[in-house]
Image (cartoon, grey):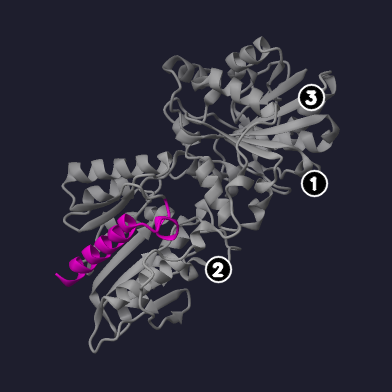
Amino acid sequence: MTAFILVSDTYTGGWIWREVAARLRESGAEAYPTTLTGMGDRRRPAGPETDLETHIRDLVRLIDDVEAAEVVLVGHGYGIHPVLGAADRRPERIARIVHLDAGLPRDGDPALTLLPDQALRDRLLRAERPAPAEDDWRIPPPAPDEWQHWGSIAGVPADALERLARLAAPQPRATLTQPLRLTGAVSAMPTTGVLCTANGSSIAMVEALVGMGDPRLRALIDPRVSFFELDTGHWPMLSAPDELAEVLRRAAAGEGHRLAATVGERPRHLGPFLIIDVPESPRERVGRVDLYPPDADRPRPAVVFVHGGPVPAEVRPTPRDWPTYVGYGRYVAGLGAVGVTVDHRLHDLADYGRAAEDVAEAVELVRADPRVDGERVALWFFSGGGLLSADWLAAPPPWLRCVAATYPVLAPLPNWGLGDSRFRPAVAVRTAGRLPIVVTRVGLERAEIAVTVEEFLAAAEDSGADVEVVDVPLGRHGFEAIDHTEQARHAVDRAVRSVLGHLRS
């Protein structure tokens, strides 16, 4: 007999699992939808002292009361924090931990570090009071029209969304600010990640992050770790209860996708640049900026290549030494322009502001170089770096002759918590005027990214923006290092020559 202990995200309680619990019980399993202290059960009211440890103790007591031989703990969003804390205290009872659209908190992490709503995260970090002083130990739930800031509500029926808003309870502040304390016992437990693609997560994205070599993610290659995807938003217990119940049953049985079979010895992003006959050219390093100047006797236009991310700070080599960016820099230098790469500091989703400053500083350095025609500069953004194009699209300076973007993210993904930030190219493009924009679109793009490109292109068409789309129908995200086809080579050459054409016109 398997018992599922179900722990939901902030502001919610056991009621949210009603349909999933019913499906699990119909299959012969036990199901325990949990309402933690202060989250809606009047028999367990919260007070100023209610913190993460309170919620951990709630789960430990429940685990001790369950008689089933196998206990599977399911943590949704914030719920993974008390789940991990309880599993750490009762490791001998836990058969598997399921991260349901949840992060990977470690010892010492408070839950607020994983909150998708960055505005609330910043407010808590600054210790501002979101409620009257006499009640400042609780955080009110979102307004009915604000739930999307806490994760995609894709697929949630209107009546379920109304119930979510009506039954939501204030979240005790200390449950989000108290650090999680772990002894390390949970690291040996079988684990399953259930990724909700409409909320911006996917197995492909996890594979890409692991492939970058981030040592903090190496544990995900362990054969005891499995993954599933659900094609829905952050609330699958409301939007896809049947599918979620089936996935939980399969996770308990040890099924799921293993990364060990797909993550190779050499990270994919370190594959050779697809255009193998790029001529060698000198590279000059100035701080975080590398320049590839052509052999020329007068100032030349420049193309600044802005890598994607977030790229963890520990990853080596850093992006400007990746074959793709070295290849682009040399390629444009061979065609008579100054190629530029920059190691901006987009190490985390909260770093977009700092990364934007790094890019702006790099551009000013490049424009001041006597070998550069400072009135003819193009900016070329890749992958998650695509969001950094927003400032330049919103108010293009006269010297910016072109913006390019390759397999870009052009609107924040739902679980990135950047919905109200300035980094929204799909909005900024409406004021880009006649600035030429070259978008390289790959046909085998991850669905969560492809939708942002289509949103951008629709906004560009509505506003009359000057957009050229270079399609790579069989190309994948990062195709320059992994898809060495004639189609891919043609696409890179066409995009490069189009950008240089705008610089020379």
Q: Earlier in the sequence, mark 3 or mark 1?
A: 3
In this view, the residue farthest toward the top is: 26
Name the mark nearer the viewer: 1 or 2: 2
Q: Residue 379's quadrant in the figure?
A: bottom left
Q: Residue at x 54, y 41 (%)?
A: 203
Calculate the distance from the C-alpha at mark 3 to the C-alpha at mark 1.
21 Å
In the image, residue 445 above or below residue 379: above
Q: Which amino acid lies under the numbered mark 3 shown in the image of this protein?
A: Glu
Task: Verify whether residue 482 appears in magenta.
Answer: yes
Asked whether 310 or 280 is in front, the reply is: 280
Q: Earlier in the sequence, mark 1 or mark 2?
A: 1
Residue positioned 16% across, 56% down in the render: 434
Q: Which residue type does callout 1 highlight?
A: Gly
- Is residue 80 rendered to the left or right of residue 162? right
Residue with the mark numbered 1 = 184
Q: Secondary structure at mark 2?
A: loop
Circle 2: residue type? Pro
26 versus 152 height, above or below: above
Query: In the rendered view of the protein, which quadrant contains the C terminus?
Result: bottom left
Residue at point 83% right, 22% down? 69
**Which residue is denoted by mark 2 in the rendering?**
317
Q: Answer with left or right where residue 55 lies relative to residue 267.
A: right
Contact? badges 1 and 2 (CB < 8 Å)? no
**Residue 70, numbered circle:** 3
